[in-house]
Amino acid sequence: MSTVRLLVLGSMLRRGVSHGYGVYNDLTSWRAETWTNVKPGSIYHALEKLEVQGLTRAEASGNHVKLGPSRTEYSITKEGKAEFESLLRSALQSFEIQTFAVGIAFMDMLPRGEVIRLLSDRASALKESASFLRTLPTEEMPSEPSKHPELTGLWENYVSSELSNTLNLITKLEAGKYRFLGE
């Protein structure tokens, strides 16, 4: 799953038509560098790749006044919107914190009920993972890394924390917090 791809498509969907600098400005104003590892160069690379794959298309600029270097403006195709929604659904179930964070950033672009279902699926998987982690054997003097109590404890705490955060978010959404697609 590409976090950059999801961010670029999400920015473009919010804007309608955009150029790379517009996407870059969005990510900067959202302070995405604090919750992802996206680099500016990856935005332009993603835009090129999305166009080659038919997920975006170049548009004629509506502004005929040259204010600086020429910029290619892009819009998202039907296939690009479907790709965004697929990536978003995956992100909302992801255990990877940066991917999940991008999912949260764009969750309002899906219907509330669907987001709650996706988060509930994530919570179930996290609960199962936490239960499994508690069964792993550890040794006071570990004979191998997988038996180190600090390592398994680290992962169990991380997964348990993610479960708690996900359940709290579900509770908020069920109570009507935030506005979602179709509301």
Image (tube, helix red, strand yellow):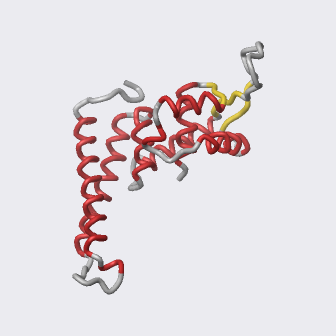
Compare residues 171 and 11 and report the one nearer the observer.
11
Residue 11 picture location, percent across and down: 54, 32
Q: Which image quadrant for residue 58?
A: top right
Residue closest to the eye, 72 or 167: 72
**Residue 83 placed where, x, y %?**
57, 43
Tell me which residue sits at (53%, 29%) in the image: 26
Res 48 quadrant in image: top right
Residue 101 image offset from top left, x and y in percent: 41, 44
Residue at 34%, 37% (x, y): give it. Answer: 113
Left or right: 141 as drawn, with respect to 113:
left
**Who's the residue at 73% across and 29% down the image?**
72
Q: Which of 153 and 134 is in front in this view?
A: 153
Going by the picture, which residue comes out furthest to the bottom?
A: 143
Q: Is residue 10 at all visible to an observer of this figure?
A: yes
Quarter of the picture containing the C terminus is top left
Q: Where is residue 37 in the image (x, y as percent from the top left)?
A: 50, 47
State whether residue 45 is above or below residue 160: above
Question: Residue at position x 53%, y 53% from top?
Answer: 1
